[in-house]
Image (cartoon, helix red, strand yellow):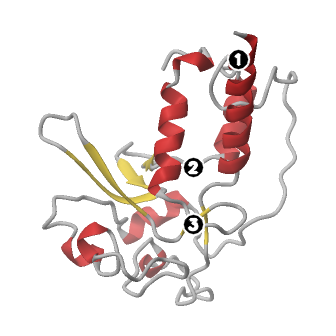
Amino acid sequence: MKLKVLSTLLLSAFLIILLSGCGKKAQDPNADKTGPSYNTKLWKKFDNIPPGADPSVADTLGGTGFEKVAEKLGFVTFTPKEDELKYFGDPRAKKGGKITTIISRFPFNFLPFGRNSHLTENSIISSMVYESLLGAHPTTRDYVPALATHWKISPDKLTFTFRLDPRARFSDGKPLTTEDMIATFKLMMDETILDPS
C-alpha cells in the first residue's frame, strides 16, 4: 500500500512539474505593438501556421484554416467587441516578470488537487501557474478562449470537443498536446489522489 501511495505521489509531482507554466504562447509577429488603443487583431486569431504547429494537420482537425470551417463543424468561440477589450488587459503588455505576494500560512503542499490542496494558498498558486481550456468573460461569465480556441458541446451534453490553440506552449517552449490534456484529466479523476472531483 505504501509503495502505491509513494508512486502516486511521485507521478503527481512529475505531472505538476511537467504542467507548470502551461499556456505560455509565442509572440505574434504581426501584432500591432505601438497603437494607442486596443486592437482586435491581437485577439487569438491567425491565418498562417503558428510557429511550431504541425503543418500536416487538416483544417477540419484544427490545423491551418480551421477558423474558416469551425462554425460549419459546430464549433463556437468568443471574439470580443472593441469596447470589451478593456476587460481583458492590454495585449501589448510586457509578458513575464516576477510577482511577490504574502500569504497567511504556508500550504501543506503545492499540489493543485489532491489531499490538502483546497487551501486558499493553493488556489492562488494554481491560478498563477496553470491555465485551463476555457476562461470566463469578466462581466458576462460566458466562456472565452484560453488553451482552447474553439469548443463544441454535443446536444446531449455528454461530449465536449475542444480545439487546442496551436500556439500553446509549456514554459520550456514545448507544444501542448491532447495527450497532455488527457493525462491531466486522468490525474484529476484518479481516486487514489484522495480528492473528490
Q: Amino acid at mark 3?
A: Pro
Judged from the image, the secondary structure of the residue bearing numbered disc 1 is helix
Q: Nearer the viewer, mark 3 or mark 1?
A: 1
The picture places residue 12, in percent across and down from the top left corner, at 68, 33
Determine the image quadrant of residue 3: top right
Q: Nearer the viewer, residue 88 or 43?
A: 43
| Residue beneath disc 2 | 131
Q: Residue at x 62, y 89 (%)?
A: 34
- Dot 3 falls on a residue whose secondary structure is loop
Q: Which residue is mark 1?
A: 5
In percent of width and height, residue 49 lies at 43, 84
- 10 Å neighbourhood of mark 2: few (<14), some, or many (≥20)? some
Residue 8 at x, y percent in the picture: 67, 25
Residues at circles 2 and 1 in contact by the CB criterion of under 8 Å: no
Query: CA gap, disc 3 to disc 2?
Result: 14 Å
In the drawing, what numbered circle is on residue 135?
Answer: none
What residue is at 48 percent from the left and 20 percent from the top?
197
Residue sitting at x 22%, y 34%:
158
Whether label 3 touches label 1, CB < 8 Å: no
Which residue in the protein does label 3 denote? Answer: 175
Three-letter amino acid code at disc 1? Val
Q: CA distance from mark 2 to mark 1?
A: 27 Å
